[in-house]
Structure formats: structure tokens, C-alpha cells
Amino acid sequence: RGESDASRKHAVSFRLAFDLLCRGRSAEARRVFAAIGARYWVALLWLEQGDAARALDEIQRGRPTGGIRDMGPEELSIVARAQARLGRQDETASAIAQLSKLASRLTTPYGERRLRLARGVAALEQHDVPTAIRELRSAVALLPPNPMERGVPILYALGCAYLAARQDV
């Protein structure tokens, strides 16, 4: 019973945080995410608000020596994007290489799709719009026929890349 109560409270906190986001109250949402240990979401909010350094600090908090070897694909995507925004090409490449290793272990298109998304978004952060468009179009091609929410981040990033290229299609 204690575990189900904790799970229910966690789910309620997540819904509260997302509700706060939808109401434009990102600072409060970030505090709720932090309270439940949702570091990915805290880091993503810092990144979306333009603070790549804080996003990196958050995603690396509690990790030995800030290493990326034990990170999952979502965390690595944030690291790659934040490092790209900070102009750290070697660190960006390292995060993408680690993400590529993870993707190669998967038997589904998910890993390759996540890798293409990370490459595309990192390229966009580095103002390499042609590479961003190429990678993001490749990610779109890997989406299932009816992608629903799984396709939204990819389609959004591709739209941003087209806008950066001044190709409003």
C-alpha cells in the first residue's frame, strides 16, 4: 500500500507540474519537478528558458564526476543540446556518440529516431541549419504511421529548423 501511495503522489505531482506549465507558471512547475526528483524535466525547463549551464548542472547532479556513460537517451539528448548551445563541440559530439552507442543496441527505430532528433537539435543550436533539416527529416521518416505524441518533438524541431532556414513550408 505504501508503494502505491507513493506512486499515486508522484503521478499527482507530475500532473500538477504539467498543469502549471500549461498555465505559464514554469518556475512553479520546475519546483514541483525538482521536489519529486524529475531531473530530466527540471533540466529541460532550464534549457528551454535559455540556461544551458543550469540544465547541464541539473542533469549531471548526483552523477560521479559528471560522466555521461550511465545516462539514458533523454538525458544524453539534453546534454548534447546544452553543450551545443554553449558552443562546446567536443562535448556535444561525445554525448551524441554515447547516444549512438545506445541506439545501436536497440532493435526498434526508436533509438535511431532519438539519435537523429538529438543530432538535428544540436545542429540547430549550432546554427547548422542544413544538417538540422537533414537529421530531423530522417527522424520524421522513422516515425510510425500515426505517431501521435511521439512525433511532436521531432515535428516541432523540424518546423523550427525550417523557420531558421527561412523556409516556411
Image (cartoon, helix red, strand yellow):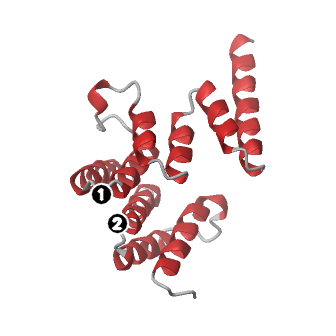
Q: Position of residue 42 (x, y in %)?
A: 55, 38
Residues packed near mark 2 inside 10 Å, few (<14), some (14 to 19) or many (20 plus) = some
Indicate the amino acid at tag 2. Answer: Gln
Seen from the viewer's position, the closer of residues 16 and 149 is: 16
Depicted 50 relative to depicted 72: above or below: below
Rendered image: mark on residue 87? 1
Q: Position of residue 96 (x, y in %)?
A: 31, 54
Q: Is residue 88 left or right of residue 58?
A: left
- Asked where in the image residue 153 lies, by quadrant, the reply is bottom right
Q: Residue at x 33, y 34 (%)?
A: 70
Q: Say what secondary structure mark 1 lies in.
A: loop
Seen from the viewer's position, the closer of residues 17 and 147 is: 17
Q: Position of residue 107 (x, y in %)?
A: 40, 54
Q: Quadrant of the C terminus?
A: bottom right
Q: Earlier in the sequence, mark 1 or mark 2?
A: 1
Residue that badge 2 annotates: 126
Contact flag, marks 1 and 2 (Cβ < 8 Å): yes
Q: Residue at x 47, y 78 (%)?
A: 164
Q: Is residue 124 left or right of residue 43?
A: left
Residue reaching furthest to the left: 90
- Asked where in the image residue 118 lies, by quadrant, the reply is bottom left
Q: Is residue 79 left or right of residue 91?
A: right
Q: CA distance from mark 1 to mark 2?
A: 7 Å
Q: Position of residue 66 (x, y in %)?
A: 30, 32
Q: Quadrant of the N terminus?
A: top right
Depicted 2 relative to depicted 61: above or below: above
Indicate the amino acid at tag 1. Answer: Gly
Rendered image: mark on residue 19? none
Q: Say what secondary structure mark 2 lies in.
A: loop
